[in-house]
Amino acid sequence: SAVISQKPSRDICQRGTSLTIQCQVDSQVTMMFWYRQQPGQSLTLIATANQGSEATYESGFVIDKFPISRPNLTFSTLTVSNMSPEDSSIYLCSVGGRGTTSTDTQYFGPGTRLTVL
Amino acid sequence: GENVEQHPSTLSVQEGDSAVIKCTYSDSASNYFPWYKQELGKRPQLIIDIRSNVGEKKDQRIAVTLNKTAKHFSLHITETQPEDSAVYFCAASSWGKLQFGAGTQVVVTP
């Protein structure tokens, strides 16, 4: 299966600042997604990162707060803007639609643990 | 949109016993149902999945069943081992997007 990496693995940030998280895959993938997982909670989809066009955001998430880039089929970034302590969470990217597998199957990166003070 | 409910939230089993986790979904258009296992501090790992044209799928000690009419699906783990201890998430997919259940903390005691 694809090797998915995320940078940074963890960070501690001050409120009001922004952090950009990178997701890199070792092969071209059709679909890339960004999720948030708050401590002890389930995974919530933030947006679908579309290659060559704007991301598609889920209800409750907006581009100004979580701008996303997807410049090619192996890379995406998520920025958490103007952070507050409520943004403390694990952010995970996932990929899907590789090769002949279904577009539904998703594999997750290792996650970025963000703490906002 | 899709809503996935998962039960129980915690499950404690004796090593060697079976564990069953149940999920229901709301969107009849959902056609793909994966299960993920997440160990503490690790990423979710896909352990088994089932599509809407199949009623049951098995992989060694784990199996998943799907009842499309009732809109529910279940994960069955037989002969549980301590390494099965983790949080398990069910999910339902329509149009490529996953909606996750709340998760089940499974503890296998020796």
Image (tube, rainbow, N blue to C red):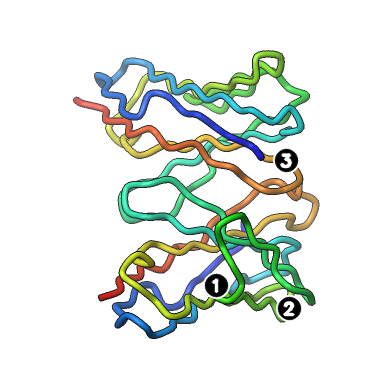
Chain to which mark 2 belongs = A
Q: Which residue is mark 2?
A: A72
Query: Which comes sooner in the sequence, label 1 or label 2?
Result: 1
Chain to which mark 3 belongs = B
Q: Nearer the viewer, mark 3 or mark 2?
A: 3
Q: Which residue is mark 1?
A: A66
Q: Which mark is residue A101?
A: none
Q: Nearer the viewer, residue A36 or A62?
A: A62
Q: Is residue B28 above or below residue B55?
A: below
Residue A91, image x, y percentages: 45, 64
Residue A78, image x, y percentages: 55, 74
Q: Nearer the viewer, residue B32 or A36?
A: A36
Q: Residues within 10 Å of mark 1 (few under 14, many from 20)?
A: many
State the SS at label 2.
strand
Q: Nearer the viewer, mark 1 or mark 2?
A: 1
Chain to which mark 1 belongs = A
State the SS at label 1.
loop
Q: Residue furthest left?
A: B110
Establish whether labels 1 and 3 are both on one chain.
no
Residue A26, image x, y percentages: 63, 71
* Amino acid found under the numbered disc labelled 3: Ser
Mark 1 vs 3: CB contact within 8 A: no
Identity of the residue drawn at 31% across and 69% down: A85
Q: Which residue is mark 3?
A: B94
* Amino acid found under the numbered disc labelled 1: Phe
Residue A44, image x, y percentages: 51, 51
State the SS at label 3.
strand
Mark 3 vs 2: CB contact within 8 A: no
Q: Where is the C terminus of chain B found, in terms of image quarters?
A: top left
* Amino acid found under the numbered disc labelled 2: Asn
Q: Label 1 to label 3, Cα distance in Å?
A: 24 Å
